[in-house]
Amino acid sequence: MDLLENYRQVKVKACMVDFLHRSKPLFKLNLAYAQMLLEQGYLNKKEKKLIVAGLKEAQKKVAKDSVLKSEDGDIWFLYEKALSQSIDPQIAAKLHIGRSRNDMYFSMYRMSLRDAVIELFDEILNSLKILEELANKNLSTVIPYYTYGQPSQPGTWAHYLMTIHNAFEADLERLQEAYRRINCCPMGAAAGIGTSFNLNKERIAELLGFDSVIENTCFANSAEDYFLELISACAIINTTLSRVAADMVFLSSAECGVLDFDHDVCESSSIMPQKKNAQAAEILRAETHHFFGYLTTAFGSAGSISLFPIHETVVYFDTFWDHLNILIDNIKLLEVNLLHSHVRESVALEKSKNGFTAATAMAEKLTVETGIPFTLTHHVVGGMIRSLMDRDDLQVDKMTPKLLEEQSVKWLGQKIVRSAEEISLMLDPLESLKAKTTGGTPRPDDTKKLISMASHHRKVFEKWLSRTKEKLQETYESL
């Protein structure tokens, strides 16, 4: 391959991305622009009708083969050429009155990004439904919560799942904000300083379903914040996915064993026949890291250039779609992990008990019952557990009345007397959760309320998505 052919192939590759993601936005933009030109008196009805017919014919003519043979570098040339071949070239040329590839492309980027947000939003909403369904089934499924890799306090699988739900809700709010900034129309900016033609940029924004126009003509063609905001939101989604995947891998490990995966989403080893690797969770954890590198590249490119449009302004748009597709696949992969795993309830309960996860609750209860400050009851319970550690006898059933008396005398100078049954109840993980009063806790009744609120929030998000889709569909159908 000679060097000029190599150069052509680079342009063809960029043009193919254009074709796959911006040919439909270009078609809609052209239809809307023709309508605006008619209303502004730059086209008569016959000319507008011919242009619309020509655009439809061009849409049929331009295919992947056209892109592969292209010498021009972007789809605008392909469709302009096809339009001029379909109708009188003099009439076809009128479509480009007062506009530039600059304001056109930045409008098309925004139109395609709207579709990206909608697709991503849709998939996250599907995940929310799954999380709510599973949480409702696991309100009393106790699991140990961890801090710094050690069992800390008792939780429930339902409460953990609603933690993921809350993270996704915040992600959806960020996507809504990003959509609001994306959905502003650059048309009318031309190449950055506007035009002397009497165009109606508010009308073309309306025809394309944009919420507003961008008044500053230079900013219309140089803004990158809307795109950086979107990919930042996407990176944060990946962060959540990565953290959940890491939790799942840990919880299903032989050392923990709280979570069990179906064989359909696990793999064995080619040499170790006993292995049951949580493959789907491991893949999810690995696949989430791609977006962070892309984010760094995009911010580095965006932050090192002029406020005037140059190639670096848009070069990282081209690989966005690959990363978006991986992100959506990752969300679906999370759904697979959730639906094909379950808590091993007896193991989780045993880990919670003998991990002394209710120790804090015991200290709290002693404070409530005796009036002794929590710091001191904390010392008493901690002393009981430390003595078991020193004897290498760390079992919850070894937390005896005698041990409580010994440690209370050591730390308080007075005996606290409780029966074995009372101590056992204080150290029961689920019973300890029932004492929680602050709301939003793993206490089953609290988690029920969290699920109810989360379901309401999801329905609000669904209404927003439905309205957004309907607005775009009605707008495009009117063209």
Image (tube, rainbow, N blue to C red):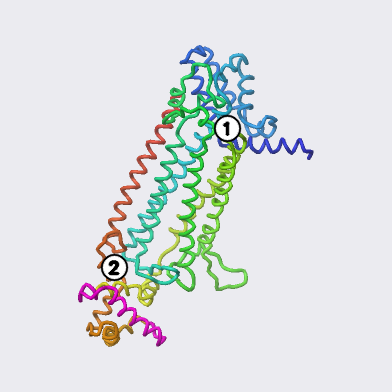
Task: Tell whether 280 sits left or right of 150.
Answer: right
Q: Label the magenta part by its dominant secondary structure.
A: helix
Please say whether residue 309 is visible from this viewpoint. Answer: yes
Answer with the quarter of the image where residue 267 lies: bottom right
Note whether 367 is above or below 470 in the view shown.
below
- What amino acid is at disc 1? Phe
Answer with the quarter of the image where residue 271 lies: bottom right
Circle 2: element type: helix
**Is 283 in front, or is 341?**
283
Residue 48 in picture, x, y percent from top left = 52, 16
Residue 384 in picture, x, y percent from top left = 33, 82
The answer to if 374 sits in the magenta stretch is: yes
Boundaries of the magenta span: 366-394
Instruction: Tell me the tag on residue 218.
Output: none
The residue carrying mark 2 is 433
Note whether 145 is above or below 4 in the view shown.
below
N-terminal-most mark, 1 or 2: 1
Q: How many marks?
A: 2
Please say whether residue 107 is visible from this viewpoint. Answer: no
Of all residues shown, which one is farthest toward the right? Answer: 2
The residue carrying mark 1 is 308
Note whether 56 is above or below 315 in the view shown.
above
- What amino acid is at disc 2? Leu
Badge 2 local density, few (<14 within 10 Å), some, or many (20+)? many
In three-dimensional space, the C-alpha distance between marks 1 and 2, rounded to whole angstroms, equals: 59 Å
Point out the image quarter for the N terminus: top right
Residue 149 in picture, x, y percent from top left = 45, 69
